[in-house]
Amino acid sequence: MEDCKNSKEVETLLGDPKKAILAMAVPTAVALIAQSANNLIDAMWVAGLGRDALAAVGIVFPIFFIMIGISNGIGIGAASAISRRLGADNGAEADKTASHALVLTLIGCAVLTAVFLLFLEPILNLMGAGASEGTMTECMNYAFPIVLFLSVFMIVGVMSSILRSEGAAKRSMYVLILSAAINMVLDPLFIYDYGLGWGMRGTAAATVVSVAVSMFIIIYWYFIRKNLFIRFKFRGFRFDSSIIKDIFSVGLPASIQMTVISAVIIFANIILLQAGGDDGVAIYASDWRIIDILIIPPMGVAMGLVPVCAAAFGAVRYDKISTAYVYSLKISVLSMILVGIITAIFAPQILTVFTYGSDTEYLRDGMVLFLRIACIFMPFMAIGMTAESLFQSLGMGMKSLFSTLFRNFLLVPVCYIAMLATSGLTYIWWGIAVSEIAGSLFIAWWTFVTLRSVMKKSGPDLKTYGP
């Protein structure tokens, strides 16, 4: 196999950490913008179907998040392991790790598909969909096609992470943008009567088709054209326990992290249903779609940080790890401060996209309030995301998991107390803000303690990088 240095993408990955972060973060952020714009347009079309449909998106989201979370967990674990091997100039082991990741994904697809198909309705009931017959119907219409074809989503999630692990973030960007564009075209044609008229089923079907296109393109690059650095090799394939352990040391905690977030969303939905009924869930789910777009800059940086720091760790360049992390932290927080100020000013105009219908217009004031509160805690979310990615890049999956547990489970009791004390939504929004700020500040402190420990192995004093 070619030496790692012969790949332009790998050269960038192993070069100047600041340039590497930008080379990874910018295309990743662009891809995330395309995906989030796609999600936003999805919500706009769904809003035209009424309040039950809008609430169904929020209720079903945790199922989708669990599915994506498991694939992203395997992908993050594989990306960290592959990048560390590339940093150590061990391309053959990087190939084996990628092959293991794909096989593990296919096994996970089979298990999850069976579980969700068998227990979909009881799971939706548990999540609050049974509060009204209309909401349950829309939840089933939306969830069933996604569950049936969940393998498409999981394979794309893992393969995109593998692309980024070898520095090919631009290719990942290309396929995700194409997928978003296809979905935007198909949504109105599949949902409304001037097309197929499938309603919520059409929303799910358009998503499945668009993601499937991305999957086939990535398969073409890796298995037919073979013009990427990593080579998947399945002839004589046997599981290697050391590789599985390496993937899951980061991947399993990362998957649990996503599952934890899904569980918190479920609990939050239950609290919101008690405090504000379907309106509370609709406000929370709709605003969070906006927040998902707004936090794309730090998300792109955090996702780019994993392969860059992992490769530096494999190359035993601990100085590059600290440089990359501090640089990532600065640009993430500064970008969120700027985005937050602009969003707070234009929140009423932004939220028109969810409240143009006659039966959703009355939700606008509540949505504006929550979004403006979110502008306060988003810079702290950036700190938390960057910190968790650093732990993942160093193979410290359990630290990353604990960070997520602390940040997210803090939200549940705070919001529940707010609901009991006030019986309204406003203080629940402030409870979310307090939880995010307190949790992220604690995790930031922990990462600098960890970095000081790592840096002692190579000499430089980290005090100049302190918080």
Image (cartoon, helix red, strand yellow):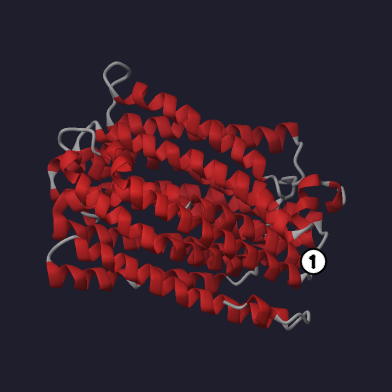
Question: What amino acid type should be assigned to the residue bearing mark 1?
Answer: Ala
Give residue 92's quadrant in the image.
bottom right
Name the residue located 31 percent from the left edge and 49 percent from the top edge.
287
Q: Is residue 80 visible?
A: yes
Residue 317 image position (x, y, % from top left): 78, 69
Residue furthest to the top in view is 194
Name the residue located 69 percent from the left edge and 49 percent from the top edge.
23
Left/right placement of residue 432 relative to residue 388 reads left
Residue 142 image position (x, y, % from top left): 31, 38
Name the residue located 19 percent from the left edge and 45 percent from the top edge.
363
Instruction: Return the residue nearer the eye: 116 or 340.
Output: 340
Where, quadrant-wise, is the C terminus in this rendering? bottom right
Residue 10 image position (x, y, % from top left): 77, 51
Q: Is residue 246 visible?
A: no
The number of numbered badges drawn on the structure is 1
Instruction: Return the residue nearer the eye: 211 or 450.
Output: 450
Residue 457 image position (x, y, % from top left): 75, 81
User: For mark 1, what is the residue?
Assistant: 315
Name the residue located 27 percent from the left edge and 72 percent from the top edge.
414
> Is label 1 in a helix, a strand or a loop?
loop
Q: Dot 1: few (<14), some (14–19), or many (≥20) neighbours within 10 Å?
A: some
